[in-house]
Amino acid sequence: MNEPRFTAGLNIAMKIPRARYDATVAFYRDTLGFEVNADDVSYAPTVSRTHSVRFGPNTLWLDCVDNYSQPDVWLQLHTDDLDAATDRLAGVGIRPSDEVEPLEDLQSRTHWIRNPAGVIHLLAETT
């Protein structure tokens, strides 16, 4: 079996309750002065609106989630072999959590996973 390689992704998603969404977008745009752009969200059915913020080398996605009561942060990981990575993670009790947010029409194979603390990560295969 191949040993998969893991690397950090450039995307960070902040899942924000609808009641706090506009104020959060304004914080990054108006208070901090970052460029904030509205983006298409059709690929993520659990997100009603999204804005992207260049956050150093990363992209911070401000996702409005109508049924959330508190914010949550999600991270991105890359691997060169999704099957080997999934097997390795399963060996330590980390299994895919793809029910978290169904994704459609992505350019790569992916799984959602949770670290032992419960933080969500999108694990994407890069070729």
Image (cartoon, helix red, strand yellow):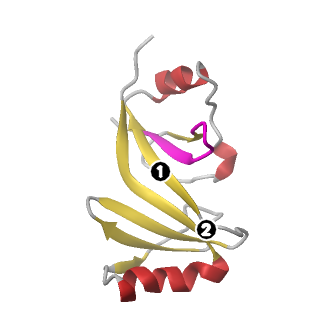
Amino acid on which disc 1 is placed: Leu
Q: Position of residue 104 (x, y in %)?
A: 56, 53
The mark that comes first in sequence, 2 or 1, is 2
* Residue at the image point whose x is 65% and y is 78% from the top: 18
Query: Where the N terminus falls, by quadrant?
Result: top left
For residue 75, the mark is 1
Q: Residue at x 32, y 66 (%)?
A: 55
Tell me the kind of residue under disc 2.
Answer: Val
Please say if 79 is above or below 99. Answer: above
The residue range painted magenta reads 115-124
Asked if marks 2 and 1 touch (Cβ < 8 Å), the reply is: no
Tell me what residue is drawn at x 63 percent, y 44 percent.
118
Q: What residue lies at 38% left-to-right and 87% top-to-bottom?
A: 31
Along the line of sight, the residue nearer the viewer: 66 or 44: 66
Quadrant of res 58: bottom left
**Left or right: where does residue 74 sit relative to residue 118?**
left
Q: Name the mark on residue 110.
A: none
At label 1, counting other C-alpha atoms closer than 10 Å, the crowd grade (few under 14, some 14-19, many 20 or more) is many
Q: Above or below — where is 86 with respect to 126? A: above
| Residue 59 vertical placement versus 93 (above, below) | below
Dot 2: element: loop
29 in magenta: no
In the drawing, does residue 83 fall left or right of residue 96?
Answer: left
Residue 96 image position (x, y, % from top left)? 62, 35
Q: Nearer the viewer, residue 11 or 70?
A: 70
Marks 2 and 1: which is nearer the front? 1
Above or below, 24 against 126 in this view is: below
Which of the pair 54/109 is nearer the observer? Answer: 54
Q: Name the residue under label 2.
A: 47
Within 10 angstroms of label 2, few (less than 14), some, or many (20 or more) residues? some
Q: Distance between the residues labelled 2 and 1?
A: 16 Å
As for residue 116 lying within the magenta part, the answer is yes
